[in-house]
Image (cartoon, coloured by chain):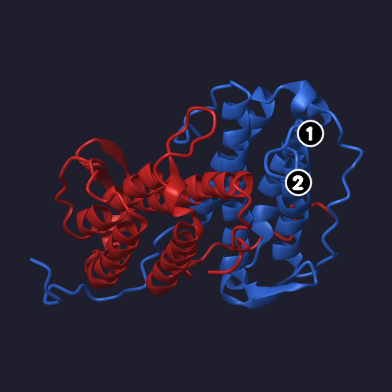
Chain colours: A blue, B red
């Protein structure tokens, strides 16, 4: 069965288009929002495993990346990454900031130039990579940290949402 | 600043091409391989947090998906998902199966028809979705579970690899 004979010609049909990629990102963000919502309020900024950060601090990082990140992709003007969102110190504030970021992404996404995805960029003035890699990093980093949040929840006796519910 | 005026026309330039997507997938798989390698042998099939599966069982799931998954994407012929890989019960066997899957993905990837990514498919005879969503699910599911593996490692006092090292 496993021969190389049936190799398929490569064309330029998009594997995924812009709107699909936006929906994919926002679908993941929607799931992360539900994980924040399920997290016990009194553990959000205190509970940790193995010296890792509390889930609230992780969410601050994700907020520091996503909103400024989409503006950076659109404009290619980058500020340094500012993870000092210490003011977002309750679940309610995190969720409110999360929703603002959701709107910001929807607003700026159409303004990301098509060529940006294949350009070399220096995200946040520091992380040099091709545009699509930078964007996928934003998404993958969220999946990675949310997976950690699932373990925190399980440890705390809370059932996380199904991974495939976006 | 945040007006809709500078909206960029949508064209059909690919955001990410096939070879880039393959490299992205294999990059993640390379990182997961390192996490398997770092996991203490005597904890791989026994250590768990909050009732979750041991990391070895998670890796069996990822192996059950990736190799048969890429063949399914290429042929659109799907067997049921078979996570019963109980024979892969040592780190050495997992790593060996991981490497075989790496080769299998490289071999079958060029044979995935271009149109498959935008077709509705029923992966493993059960999971109906558009092709690119199914593929991204394979990748994202691995990121998600590997993130859980990071917490296991931290709990066990082992420093996981940096997330960005692929």
| Disc 1: CA contacts within 10 A as few (<14), some (14-19) or many (>=20) | many
Query: Where's residue B33, x and y in %?
Result: 43, 62
Q: Earlier in the sequence, mark 1 or mark 2?
A: 2
- Residue B162 figure quarter: bottom right
Query: Where's residue B1, x and y in %?
Result: 86, 55
Find the distance from the CA under tag 1 to the CA under tag 2. 9 Å
**1 and 2 marks in contact (CB < 8 Å):** yes
> As drawn, which residue projects farthest toward the left?
A1
Chain bearing mark 2: A
* Residue in the image at 76% along x and 26% along y: A43
* Residue in the image at 32% along x and 74% along y: A11
* Residue in the image at 13% along x and 72% along y: A6
Query: Where's residue A163, x and y in %?
Result: 48, 35
* Residue in the image at 27% along x and 51% along y: B88
Query: Where's residue A101, x and y in %?
Result: 74, 43
Q: Is residue B119 visible?
A: no
Viewer-side residue, A44 vs B156: B156
- Residue A158 figure quarter: top right
In this figure, which residue is indicated by the disc labeled 2? A63
Chain bearing mark 1: A
Q: Is residue A165 above or below residue B121?
A: above
- Label 2: element kind: helix
In this figure, which residue is indicated by the disc labeled 1? A94
- Residue B114 figure quarter: bottom left
Viewer-side residue, A140 vs A24: A140
Return the mark for residue B99: none
């Amino acid at each position: 069965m496993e021969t190389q004979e049936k190799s398929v010609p490569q064309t330029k049909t998009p594997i995924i288009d812009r709107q699909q990629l936006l929906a994919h990102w926002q679908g993941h963000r929607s799931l992360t929002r539900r994980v924040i919502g399920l997290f016990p309020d009194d553990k959000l900024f205190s509970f940790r495993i193995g010296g890792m950060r509390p889930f609230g601090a992780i969410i601050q990082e994700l907020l520091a990346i996503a909103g400024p990140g989409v503006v950076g992709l659109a404009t290619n003007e980058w500020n340094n990454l500012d993870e000092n969102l210490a003011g977002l110190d309750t679940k309610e504030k995190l969720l409110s900031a999360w929703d603002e970021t959701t709107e910001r992404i929807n607003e700026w996404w159409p303004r990301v130039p098509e060529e940006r995805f294949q350009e070399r960029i220096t995200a946040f003035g520091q992380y040099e990579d091709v545009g699509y890699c930078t964007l996928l990093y934003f998404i993958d980093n969220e999946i990675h940290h949310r997976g950690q949040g699932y373990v925190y929840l399980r440890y705390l006796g809370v059932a996380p949402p199904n991974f495939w519910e976006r």
